[in-house]
Image (cartoon, rainbow, N blue to C red):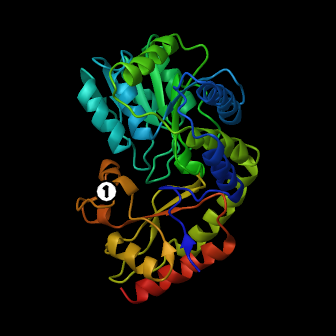
Amino acid sequence: MTVYLDQAAAARPAPEAIEFYFARVRENYANQEAAHRLGHDARQQLDRAAEELSLALTGEAGWKVIWGGCGTELFNLFADSPLAAGKCAITSPLEHPALLAVLRRSAAELRLLRPDRCGLILPEELPAGDLLALHQVQSELGTIQPIGPLAEAFRRNSPAGILFVDAIQGAAKLPFPREADIVAVSGRKFGAPGGGAALLIRPAFRGGKTLLEFARRWRHELYRSCRPEVPALLALAFAAGLRATKQEEAARRIGELNAAVRRELENLPLPGGGRIRCTVPPELASPYLLHLLLPGIQSGVMVRMLSAAGVMAAAGSACASESREPSAALRAIGLNRNDAYSGLRIGFGFDSTAEEAKKLVEALKDALKNY
């Protein structure tokens, strides 16, 4: 039995989504930019899919959609746009490395906020700026940012400022951050086979037309992005709709699994005298993510030991899995260098089960005995 608990890196697709995707692969093979009828049909289907995606995630069909192949591509598009390039951008050291990299490249000034020990950004500490770019859910710790209060504080300080939210870990799992002007989502994180990603633009956002026009130029004149595959984008919208219908029920059920694992593992003795600690309290974290600290344990080694036992987990963000440096997220919240090597991320999915949670606990206890 393989237990897959790295679903923060890539969610396991639902069987219905897989069937839908392969049907689209068989039928929607034409280039959506072609002048013939099949190209026209593909464009119409993408327009309908954009409405479906908006409705599924936000509860209304009016959000405009910019399609992309992955989140990193869309981060680059936004950072190069007139809305971000040459601006004073505010963000945090807890953002996805791809978002931090593009903002460092494009912004005239980058101000980094200081998170607290749980990874929270405090609204009262927000300075003025042209742009605030933050995550909804921190991809390693699982911390949920208070987007509503942050948006209110930012707009009070910066009435013309733009709020960009990376909702890649929260989309279709948690309430959508409707206070944002622009929101990034990725199908890979909620089980869309084939990947695909999108930027959703708030209907009343005045900069929406500017971003849409720039996205057209970025693709068709500057040739900075690939042509996203139609089946993947249609499957993204389908998977979002599939998840949205059971979002609250799934979050409650997965939250119960998460809590059960916390109870079993928190304060468990470790070799060397330490104890397992949960990094973020449950009331501040996504039910889909559980981050553990195992002081004195190299989490990279623990991930390989768990894998040998059939349990797939992660030492941190998948994008930094090959780094020899300690976790940047754990260092950012004040952990020392040694402890920042000891983080273990459990990524639950929509289909995670009590049996899988039990297997994780057993495998981790056995691995610690043999560490």
Residue at horizontal 72%, vertical 59%?
253
Q: Amino acid at mark 1?
A: Ser
Numbered circles on residues, count: 1
Seen in the picture, residue 41 relative to 129 is either above or below; the reply is: below
Camera-nearest residue between 225 and 245: 225
Q: Residue furthest bottom?
A: 370
Please give left or right for residue 165 compared with residue 37 in the image: left
Q: Looking at the picture, how far across and down is residue 27, in whole percent?
A: 65, 43
Instruction: Specify the quadrant that holds the N terminus.
Output: bottom right
**Residue bearing the label numbered 1:** 327
Instruction: Specify the quadrant that holds the C terminus.
Output: bottom left
Dividing the picture into quarters, in which one does residue 32 lie?
Answer: top right
Please give left or right for residue 205 compared with residue 74 in the image: right
Circle 1 residues within 10 Å: few <14, some 14–19, many ≥20: many
Dividing the picture into quarters, in which one does residue 14 lie?
Answer: bottom right
Q: SS class of the residue under badge 1?
A: loop
